[in-house]
Amino acid sequence: MRDRADVVIIGGGINGVCAAYHLCKRGVRKVIVVEKDYLAAGSTGRCGAGVRHQWGAEMNVRLAREAIAQYERADEELGYPGGIEFKQKGYLLLAYTDKQVEQFKRNVSLQKSMGIPVDFLTPEEAREIVPHLNIEGLMGATFCPKDGHINPFKATDAYARAARRLGAEIRLRTRVTGIKTRAGRVTGVVTTAGEIDAPVVINTAGPWSREVGLMAGVDIPVYPQRHQILVTEPVDPNLQGPMVMSFHHNLYCQQTPHGSFIMGIGDPDEPKNHDYGSTWQFLEEMARKICWLLPVLKGLRIVRQWAGSYENSPDAHPIICEVSELKGFYVATGFSGHGFMLAPVAGLILSQLITGEKPTLPAERLGLERFQTGELNIEPAVV
Amino acid sequence: MRIKHHPILDFPEKPKVTFFFEGQPLEGYEGEPIAAALHAAGIRVLRYSPELHRPRGFFCAIGNCSSCLMEVDGVPNVRVCMEKLRAGMQVRRQRGKGDIRATH
């Protein structure tokens, strides 16, 4: 079997389907998404389901602002019955050291200068927003009411359905095994279900994007790292409005609209590979930390524990570009744990680059070249 | 209805205790599952489902299905098929997913 497409997208996570949607919307006729498992089977379906404006680097704030604006209108724009469960009740970020307070104040003034509604709060003010918060040792907090929760499965389904309606084809359980090139140009992909000729190929393979890049001889400087997460039984959904996040404890915890609590820890010692295993150590550490920080959760039953991969870039900013040494080969990766929340803007930028439109955002700063010049602006606000 | 004779299990007599269902005193055997005492007293509706508020009764009996989640001594989401009966327990039908604030 030999097929033709205008664009082949490798990876059916939120980034793949968002790219497909934006390309179809811009009139690209034949878009094929190739996914080795099922939609959202990788990092998207394993993520913490949060979206936030509160970043320490200007570029990430700009990206998040555009992405969240798209998510805000997604139910209507995509015509998705039941909606993507955007619970816009904010993120509360906690500061426990002088250094964090200073950093948070810098972040707030940066975010405010970009029109983000965010405030620096005293511990008492933080407790007004989350009454069950233990404020022992807390020095301050920041809060943005426009951050929140979105259901990753529904969001992926919503963009996939919208893309299909506009003509995109999504091939599930189909693995890309090779990328074809000729004279510095990409010419298509080889899959487990035949070849597809295409002048444009996009790599949105998340934690697998380095391997996919290497198929085309392109070394993308990202690596996967396991992050563990768990979810509790549901209780009254009005218990906790915002996501609570502490960089000091390296944890986050939010209540979904369903009433369950999702929480995770960022552990720098986690394996840097495709390991999806779950550990007792995480379960115990998570439970201990969260019962100290949010004592009301004591006794709540944990119903499920799992893991997913971040794909980390050297500066914790995404890489969204055409690869200069291989015409037609585009990447959107390196989201460093924030691919779900940034996907709508990544899809938009890709579609603009591919159709020759001027990108809405300064995409030239998201290219691979930045890793050669060595001038990196590293995002400080990552769990 | 109670099983008195069983081919492989024994049912030694346990002390009778009083507990309360929706404020009404009932009797049961100490240490039996709360659900067993309620069932013996003819109580079939244990909770109402959170979304459609439909009555839910005794179902899996092994702590898996969430059908029998009740409020016991103010604590919501208690699996009464697993929880042992003690004297004086206040057992109530649960509505909604349970507010855990009251228990802390």
Image: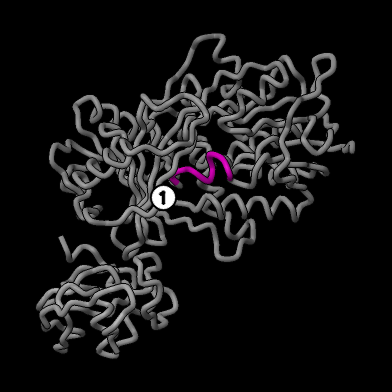
Report the residue marked by disc 1. Answer: A148
Chain at numbered mark 1: A
Q: Which residues are magenta?
A: A41-48
Q: Secondary structure at mark 1?
A: strand
Amino acid under disc 1 = Gly
Can residue B65 be spotted in the picture?
Answer: yes
Q: Position of residue A254 (x, y in %)?
A: 35, 50
Tell me if A168 is positioned left or right of A257 in this view: right
Q: Is residue B41 left or right of residue A266?
A: left
Which sits in the foreground, A182 or A305?
Answer: A305
In x, y percent, where is residue A300? Answer: 27, 56
User: Residue A158 magenta-drawn?
Assistant: no
Q: In this orientation, which residue lies closer to the viewer: B10 or A105?
A: B10
In the image shown, does B23 or B81 lie closer to the viewer?
B81
Instruction: Identify the residue at image location x=18%, y=77%.
Output: B12
Residue A177, percent across and down? 74, 29
State whether residue B6 is above or below residue A291. Answer: below
Quick one: quadrant of the C terminus of chain A? top left
Q: Residue furthest front?
A: B7
Viewport quadrant of the N terminus of chain A: top right
Residue found at x 61% / y 61%: A80
